[in-house]
Image (spheres, grey):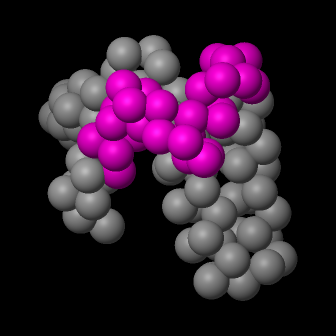
Amino acid sequence: MSSNVLDTLYSIILDRISNKKEGSYTVKLLEKGKPYIARKVGEEATEVIVASLSEGRERFISEVADLIYHLFVLMAVEGVKPEDVYEELKRRMK
């Protein structure tokens, strides 16, 4: 996955936060609050584990995408940009 895709996803999430697009799943998550979003991240992480152990490659890919999306929503709520995470990962590669 290209970081461009991730950056675009994050930009869309920020737009949903700013513009409260009607019917948006992101807006619905935000309305439920940070604790709910954090629990969704945990739920999606569990689904990634289950998919990796018993549900096949396609399901695993789908669940990883769900996890990344929910992580990005939580990051946006926390004010953490993808670049912040990229920099941390770069720091760890030394």
Q: Residue 69 vs residue 51: left or right?
A: left
Q: Is residue 69 visible?
A: yes
Task: Please provide percent x and percent y for residue 40.
Answer: 72, 38
User: Is residue 21 a member of the stretch shown in magenta?
Assistant: yes
User: Is residue 90 a member of the stretch shown in magenta?
Assistant: no
Asked whether 79 or 53 is in front, the reply is 79
Q: Quadrant of the N terminus?
A: bottom left
Q: Main secondary structure of the magenta part?
A: helix
Q: Quadrant of the C terminus?
A: top left
Asked whether 35 or 59 is in front, the reply is 35
Q: Residue at x 63, y 83 (%)?
A: 57
Relative to 83, does residue 65 appear above or below in the rendering?
below
Q: Residue at x 55, y 42 (%)?
A: 22
Q: Residue at x 53, y 28 (%)?
A: 74
> Start and end of the magenta stretch?
9-36
Task: Please provide percent x and percent y for residue 19.
Answer: 38, 31
